[in-house]
Amino acid sequence: MCSPMTPKHTPGVPGIRSGPIPWLTAPLRTSIEEAASAYEGRPWRIRSEADLSEFACHRCALVSDGRFSVFFKYSEMSNAGAQFEAELSGLKTLSTTAGVLIPEPIGIVPVEGGTLLVLEALEAVERGPREWREIGATLGRIHRVRGDACGLGTNGFFGPLTQDNAPAPTWADFFAQRRLLPLLKTAVDSGHLPLAVSHNVERLLPRLPDLCGPEAAPRLLHGDAQQNNFISTAAGTFVIDPAVYYGNPEIDLALVDAFQPAPDAVFAGYQDEAPIDPGFFERRDLWRLPLYLAAVALEGPDHLCRLKNALRKYV
């Protein structure tokens, strides 16, 4: 899964610079080639490669034999297999329950010292008004799927961070106990979060039942619905890098433009499929707090300004 906060290039996006990848060792190449060969049913060898690791929290790249391209992630973390299994499970859930497009998985491949996740590459197109509107509509289709409670039967990951999906009786409870508090601890433990900011997050918690607005019926969530986790192609909009659970759909909607501006067409497309409560725009920065805490924890104090500005609206 790519970093939940860094704008990234994604498979097939024009303008990615190709060239030899120093960390793509011979054993990794062989494992990728064997997986792609088995998937294609013919010999497949890497002829071109482009490193995308600068834009992700895993090492990842786009590789091709000139006829067929694959995207892969490589992690040396001990729980990499679990991370990639959760990612594929989330993609399958989004596809089977919401009917959205997902990249075809090639496989999860254990290798010496780590694990590979190999997917078919997507041929992205430049976004215009139609593509932006389709991103919103895709998110709206996901949110039409109802759940019984906030949470999920299994835990997952947000980027490389573990994500507690244990159900909670209300959205305010879930948001506090499963999102804000764990990520607050992670940010504090990183050493990047000043004590005063940590205290402001703690002061916010008792006010959440009032700040969270009307209790919304739990809906299926992408979980990391930043705009770069939607890939615009000639065939339509694909979703990638999910962190799925059920909850308030406003938290997904708030992440679309949390780090990069998005045109109004996104919200118009969303409203083609699902309504937006008028109070959402007052609550939008509240829903972004977990993302900003994760950003501080993983990438450092450069993200403190966003976090403090968001908190200032509610504390």
Image: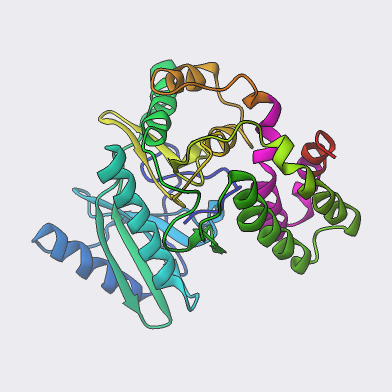
In this rendered view, identify the residue nearer to me: 12 or 46.
12
Magenta stretch, overall SS: helix
Q: Is residue 196 magenta?
A: no
Give the residue displayed 41% in from the left and 29% down from the top: 140
Task: Residue at the far right: name it.
Answer: 196
As for residue 304 lying within the magenta part, the answer is: yes
Q: Where residue 81 appears, x then y in whole percent? A: 39, 72
Nearer to us in this view, 143 or 40: 143
Specify how the rendered protein is coloured.
Answer: rainbow
Q: On the rendered structure, is 106 left or right of 158?
A: left
Quadrant of the image for the C terminus? Answer: top right
Determine which quarter of the picture holds residue 152.
bottom left
Q: Is residue 279 above or below residue 180?
A: above
Residue appearing at x 22%, y 49% in the figure? 66
* Nearer to me, 15 or 35: 35
Q: Position of residue 49 (x, y in %)?
A: 36, 55
Residue at the spot 41% in from the left edge and 56% down from the top edge: 61
Q: Position of residue 300 (x, y in %)?
A: 74, 57
Q: Is residue 92 left or right of residue 37?
A: right
> Measured from the top left, where is residue 239 in percent x and y?
37, 41
Up-down relation of residue 6 to residue 212 (above or below)? below
- For the magenta stretch, what is the residue range? 282-307
Q: Is residue 39 above or below residue 277?
A: below
Q: Residue at x 20, y 70 (%)?
A: 34
Residue 127 appears anywhere in the view: no
- Return the residue found at the far left: 41
